[in-house]
Image (cartoon, rainbow, N blue to C red):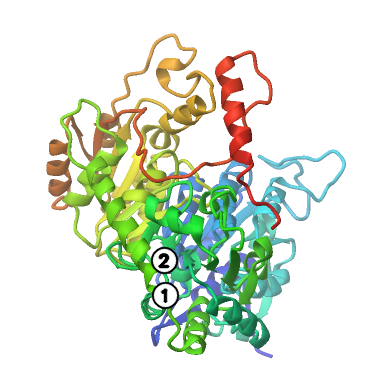
Amino acid sequence: MKTIRLTMAQAVARFLSVQKIEIDNKVEPIFAGVWAIFGHGNVSGMGEALYQVQDKLPTYRAHNEQGMAHAAIAFAKSKQRQRMMACTTSIGPGATNMVTAAALAHVNRLPLLLLPGDVFANRHPDPVLQQIENFSDGTISANDCFKPVSRYFDRITRPEQIIPALNRAMNVLTDPADCGPVTLSLCQDTQAEAYDYPESFFEEKIWYIRRPTVDAKELEIALSALKVAKKPLIIAGGGVHYSKACDALRSFAERHKIPVTETQAGKSALPHDHPMNMGAIGVTGTSAANKLAEEADIILAVGTRLQDFTTGSWALFKNPDRRFIGINVQNFDATKHRSLPLIGDALSTLQQLSTKLESWQAPDEWATLGHNAHQSWLNDASKVTASTPDLYPSDAQVIGAVQRSSPKDSIVVCAAGGLPGELHKLWQASAPGSYHVEYGYSCMGYEIAGGLGVKLANPDQEVIVMVGDGSYLMMNSEIATSVLLGQRLTIVVLDNRGYGCINRLQRGTGNPSFNNLLEHTNHQSLPDIDFKAHAESLGAIASKVSTIDELEAALEQAQNKDKTTVIVIDTDPLASTEAGGHWWDVAVPEISSDKNVNSARENYETALKQQRIGD
């Protein structure tokens, strides 16, 4: 057996550089690069190794570890989980800064390779700088925080251990069912230790994303249920995108006349103006989608986790005879709430179902009901997104301005607060992938870093980040990274002077405004934050606009700029779109000295009776 002597870190870098994937008959590197913030725990080992392979495996410098991991996640999502990125940090805070991002990737089932440094395996200098010491367990380090938010975790204490660890990592990262974050915790002394690695370990490997097929018996059972349906409905989740099943979904819906609704992750699976697309479903859904969901007797859940925003906390589906059919590569998701499971790839399963259904179609009156409901919704949506002379426009009016002023193939990016709900209802997605909202983990601070990852994946498209002032203040440093890398973003900052979304939720549960909007905090003075000046200090072009008309003009100008542009507009913290939507289960105190809370509790208990749990 021929061997090559390398350090463990050199072996990692060389291995990653030869991993390839075939996409549409073209072979590409599966890793588009490595994000790195160096410290004492990785600069000597991984830093030296990455320098040696930078012509094959680019290294990108970021300004925040969580931010760079968010960028890597957004890149992977934009590439339908077929290409990905890795992230390396030092030990201590550099590593634990990525734990939130790991949780986000875990929830959203997205591939992310994390390579944090760790303590010395030989323990000679214990405790080393930044080391967490456990008084009862000498094997624990800060990186154990990654265990519950990783699909696969390994701590490398000897250089030869990296061989099985990397092979296992790649299997997880490319598996459609088990896909998620992988953490390989690299002890800093082990990174520098040499070993005689087999040359075969570094041979080019071409990966393919498998498409598991459904069980014949389960397909037969699901078909029997679907063929007697009078009011069938499809929920399109993120799995539709990851399996590249958007065209198959369109053909299936058209052929069998089944209306389609979309989750946050599934939105843009069909064009917004497709006659079978009822739009967003659930808590942030359209009136059309939710009306059909209330009456549906068979719900075909394609590639979705069926989280509470999708199901209206399981109070949305009111037909007592309803059944779910779960199409999913992951058994855990396919069988939720006693669904009839079709455990397989979305694209191949939809094609199989369509072939078996032959000419079967849903009743014409069901499709007509959906069409009429959708037209009514479009009328409502056009009213709330229209331009306004108001001093403080609503989020919906800003969304309307962004939509009107942007190229049709623009990609909108968002994550947390009230904006995702308004975008889910109101954004008119024209093509698959043009809507990128992280709402599985609803992570404040994802937006700008995520926008950078989306831009890296789609360099020729306009990427528009919509972010509230709260999220902007949590994480904005990757504005500087976007300038550094020459990746132009358009960032619209909606300043409602606090956490407006949670303030509305607070008031909706009977509580007075408290500790959310800046004016309702315990303060000595209110900060007058100049977001324009701040963005400019990070190297961006920035402007502050006062009206919707000014916003539209600024958005059009931004398309001609050569670097990231930030546009700031003050918005109304109280306004939200009343049309559409559904109840969401947020527990209200059972007793309170506040009569408004007690009243909200009564309403809450009434709403709880609509939940259908376990049936």
Q: Quadrant of the N terminus?
A: bottom right
Instruction: Please tell me which residue is depicted at 36% across the width and 25% down the height of the picture.
Output: 497
Instruction: Please tell me which residue is depicted at 70% across the width and 74% down the height of the picture.
Output: 164
Q: Position of residue 234 (x, y in %)?
A: 47, 67
Q: Is residue 453 among what the camera can see?
A: no
Q: Quadrant of the C terminus?
A: bottom right
What's the distance in space between the residues labelled 2 and 1, CA to CA?
9 Å
Residue at the top extreme of this rendering? 524
Residue where numbered disc 2 is placed: 260
Q: Is residue 589 above or below residue 307?
A: above
Q: Nearer the viewer, mark 2 or mark 1?
A: 2
Q: Amino acid at mark 1?
A: Leu
State which tag comes first along the sequence, 2 or 1: 1
Instruction: Please tell me which residue is depicted at 60% across the width and 33% down the height of the picture.
Output: 604
Residue at the front extreme of this rendering? 365
Q: Amino acid at mark 2?
A: Val
Q: Position of residue 293 (x, y in %)?
A: 48, 58
In which image quadrant can residue 466 be found?
Answer: top left
In which image quadrant can residue 369 be found?
Answer: bottom left
Q: Residues within 10 Å of mark 2 (few under 14, many from 20)?
A: many
Q: Position of residue 590 (x, y in %)?
A: 68, 26
Which residue occupies the foreground of this view, 580 or 296?
296
Which residue occupies the foreground of this view, 594 or 366?
366
The disc at residue 249 is 1
Q: Residues within 10 Å of mark 1 (few under 14, many from 20)?
A: many
Q: Is residue 93 among what the camera can see?
A: yes
Query: Are the residues at dot 2 and dot 1 in contact (C-beta closer than 8 Å)?
Result: yes
Which residue occupies the foreground of this view, 540 or 239?
239
Q: Is residue 270 above or below residue 604?
A: below
* Left or right position of 567 against 277: left
The disc at residue 416 is none
Q: Position of residue 132 (x, y in %)?
A: 73, 40
